[in-house]
Image (tube, helix red, strand yellow):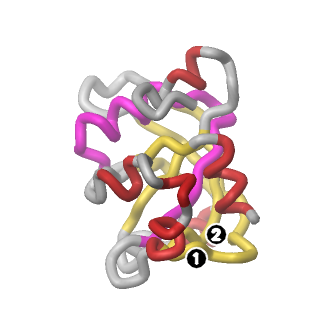
């Protein structure tokens, strides 16, 4: 994935990967496991909204707890994206699995794969594109 154009993989028909951030006291991975499927909402940052608009059914993503935890804890998959709302698309997602080895923000920052990632460079971005290599690192 071209880090200057992280959506390039979407336009080239390659699998796209993202990381979604949430406060665990607002909506945790355990909540997601219990619901199995939900609408991902609450995104307001224009860049994050752009990433949501570009997603397609089957897009894989990492579930990341922010706040004091700052840890990637699980996975999810986009079921559908409905662009009907002019402000934020309606993104239906289903739960994946808990990560075998959760990854902390400190571990992410120590990993050279993330040196130029928006995950470490733009800390307030709630939807972050990932390369395939970064996705694999989270799953390892």
What residue lies at 50% left-to-right and 69% top-to-bottom?
110
Q: Is residue 22 above or below residue 79?
A: below
- Secondary structure of residue under mark 1: helix
Q: Is residue 80 above or below residue 86?
A: below
How many numbered tags mark residues here? 2
Whole-percent x, y for residue 135 in the image: 65, 51
What residue lies at 57% left-to-right and 31% top-to-bottom?
1
Whether tag 1 and tag 2 are in contact, CB under 8 A, the answer is yes
Q: Residues within 10 Å of mark 1 (few under 14, many from 20)?
A: some
- Kindly give the residue lying farthest to the top in the view shown: 12
Task: Name the residue that disc number 1 marks.
Answer: 30
- Magenta stretch: includes residue 56: yes
- The range drawn in magenta is 43-65
Position of 51 with respect to 18 (left or right) is left
Whole-percent x, y for residue 73 in the image: 59, 71
- Magenta stretch: includes residue 46: yes
Q: Residues within 10 Å of mark 2 (few under 14, many from 20)?
A: some
What residue lies at 51% left-to-right and 66% top-to-bottom?
108
- Secondary structure of residue under mark 2: helix
Q: Distance of mark 1 from mark 2, alpha carbons?
A: 5 Å
Camera-nearest residue between 112 and 125: 112
Q: Is residue 14 above or below residue 96?
A: above
Position of 71 with respect to 58 (left or right) is left
Whole-percent x, y for residue 14 in the image: 69, 24
Task: Name the residue that disc number 2 marks.
Answer: 33
Position of 40 with respect to 95 (left or right) is left
């Amino acid at each position: 994935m071209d880090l200057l154009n992280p959506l390039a993989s979407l336009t080239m028909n390659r699998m796209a990967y993202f990381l979604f951030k949430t406060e665990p006291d607002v909506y945790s991975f355990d909540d997601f496991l219990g619901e199995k499927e939900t609408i991902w909402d609450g995104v307001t940052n224009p860049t994050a909204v752009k990433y949501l608009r570009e997603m397609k059914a089957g897009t894989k993503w990492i579930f990341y707890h922010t706040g004091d935890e700052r840890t990637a804890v699980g996975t999810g998959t986009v079921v559908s994206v409905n662009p009907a709302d002019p402000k934020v698309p309606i993104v239906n997602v289903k739960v994946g699995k808990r990560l075998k080895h959760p990854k902390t923000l400190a571990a992410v920052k120590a990993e050279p794969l993330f040196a130029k990632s928006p995950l470490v460079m733009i800390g307030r971005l709630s939807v972050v594109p990932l390369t395939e290599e970064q996705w694999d690192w989270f799953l390892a």
